[in-house]
Amino acid sequence: MPIVRTSEAVTHEIHGARFISYAAPLTGSKELCAWRGEIPAGTKAPLHTVSREEIFHLLIGELLITLDGRTDRITAGDTVIVNPGATLGVENPTDQTAISWVTTSIGLEAVLEDGTRITPPWAN
């Protein structure tokens, strides 16, 4: 039975946020990836279009989520379903770090507004 201990999780940082990967092919997952996201106060991630569905659950804090041009404030306990092909933006306008849990299928890619393609290692 694959168990990923906190001490074994792999941390990645991009665009001012931290992604702590728990479930991915590297840790034995065959279909899904899951990670904890840490979004520091004042962080505004660039808009990006995702290739796979993401389930984004906010554990701690508040965020502004922009999904296909519509912006909503979410708070701890809220879940955002991001469908494939949707354009997502995440902003933390507060003075505290927000913590999320995100799940997607293996193979997620994101395309930034300038056309840059990102294949995040925590989702592949």
Image (cartoon, rainbow, N blue to C red):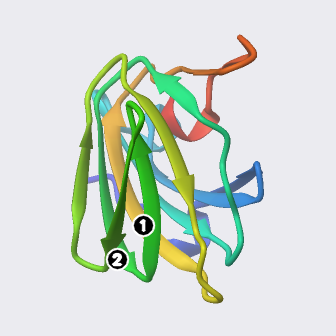
Task: Relative to 59, say whether 87 is above or below.
Answer: above
Measuring from the top left, give residue 64's x and y in whole percent.
46, 62
Q: Label 2 vs label 1: CA separation?
A: 5 Å
Q: Nearer the viewer, residue 82 or 124?
A: 82
Instruction: Report the residue at 44% width, 46% height from top.
Output: 66
| Residue type at the position of mark 2 | Leu
Q: Nearer the viewer, residue 7 or 120?
A: 120
Is 67 displayed left or right of 6 in the figure?
A: left
Instruction: Report the residue at 39% width, 25% height from top.
Output: 106
Is 93 displayed left or right of 115 in the figure?
A: left
Instruction: Report the residue at 42% width, 66% height from top.
Output: 100
Is 64 displayed left or right of 78 in the figure?
A: right
Give the quarter of the image for residue 111: top right
Instruction: Report the residue at 52% width, 62% height from top.
Output: 37
Q: How many marks?
A: 2
The mark found on residue 59 in the picture is 2
Q: Which residue is mark 1?
A: 100
Q: Which structural element holds mark 1?
A: strand
Q: Earlier in the sequence, mark 2 or mark 1?
A: 2
Q: Are marks 2 and 1 in contact (CB under 8 Å)?
A: yes
Q: Nearer the viewer, residue 28 or 103?
A: 103
| Residue type at the position of mark 1 | Ser
